[in-house]
Image (cartoon, helix red, strand yellow):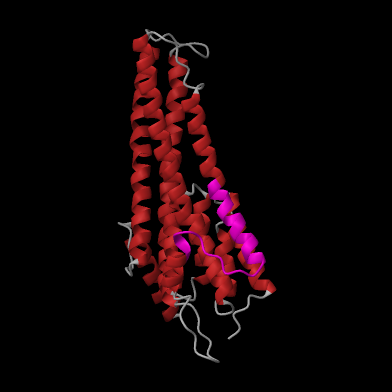
Amino acid sequence: MNNTPTSEDRIWAVFSHLAALSFGMGILLPIVGWSDQRRKSNYASFQCLQALGYQSLGFTVWVLAYLVILVVALIILVAMSFQAEKAGTNFNPFLGPGTTAIFVVLFGLFVLYCIFPILAAIACALGKDVRYPFLGKRLARYLEYDRVQEPDEQDWLNEDHEFRWVAAAGHFSILILFWGLLAPLTTWMLQGRQNLFLKFQSIQTLLYQALTTVVYAVGAFFYVFGFLLLLISMGAIGALALSSSLGTITTVIFAVCLLIAFALLLSVPLLHILGQWAGFRILKGENYHYPLVGRLVQRWLSKNSAEEKSI
């Protein structure tokens, strides 16, 4: 078996890695590349799957790191503000070495996220078998990419683990707002007919992520709508006095909208956590079912299968 990557192999690998620079929109490209190259090239298949993992799981780690830094930065700035108030000095949270350091760290994380796929793409263009730090070696072991191959024998990646990795990446991509839906949708369209497990996981992931996106959108709508009503009730855009009966009703509606918005928006991180947990269970060998959603999808697939057999 010839392990030297061809021009086609390198092209798929390069574009799959560079797709990470689109920040979610390009997550379908590694899936398309893997679907096209599996059972053609282990090199291209592995590089596409590695790029897929970086865009889904790596994006999750990147977002979580940003959130941690922002929370810590906010706590530090609030503490510095209280300290300045006690000392009777002026404090501008947007100026000073502390704020500059925070922006440098945030920008550094952004550059760090971008530099790995760029370097990987350059290495693949040169025909190198590149591995991402932490991710690459573990994925190679999981897919059995580095196992010894018998002479004159076509030895492919572990098929079951390939499907599980792609399915898990679909679950992990839930943090990529809107564009994360492309991962399970593309997988379903390209590989749904070849593997029932992948078909079920893709459909339930697509439905679950769509519902999560709807929850987020509805929560954001109530939040914006509530604040518009608040501005009206305060007379900021023309017209209602807070002491009037209409102003009081508007304020009550604002409070209700705000409670609904907070309830919905606070549930979104929990839905994201469940998506990450689902991906983890898939990699551990489980055919994970989302609560309610998984059961509905299974019934729908069973019904369609029975109808196809009757035809």
Q: In this view, does 69 lie above or below 117?
A: above
Residue 106 coordinates in the image, percent (x, y): 50, 38
* Residue 2 pos. (x, y %): 61, 83
Q: Position of residue 277 (x, y in %)?
A: 33, 56
Question: Nearest the camera: 277 or 310?
Answer: 277
Left or right, 35 with respect to 175, comes to: right
The relative height of residue 56 versus residue 218 in the rendered view (above or below) is below
Residue most toward the front? Answer: 97
Magenta range is 112-136
- Residue at image coords 58%, 71%: 44
Rendered-image quadrant of the N terminus? bottom right
Residue 232 can be seen, yes or no: yes
121 or 292: nearer the viewer: 121
Q: Check residue 128 for magenta coloring.
A: yes
Residue at the image position 41 percent from the left and 65 percent from the top:
201
Task: Check the image and report above or below for 231 versus 60.
Answer: above
Looking at this rendering, what residue extends furthest in the left direction? 291
Residue 144 x, y percent position in the rendering: 44, 76
Q: Is residue 217 left or right of residue 190?
A: left
Task: Specify whether residue 103 is painted magenta.
Answer: no
Residue 185, visible in the rendered structure: no
Question: Which residue is more in the foreground, 15 or 80?
Answer: 80
| Farthest residue, direction right | 7
Q: Main secondary structure of the magenta part?
A: helix
Residue shown at 44% from the left, 77% from the top: 158
Left/right placement of residue 270 relative to residue 92 reads left
Q: Residue at x 38, y 60 (%)?
A: 279
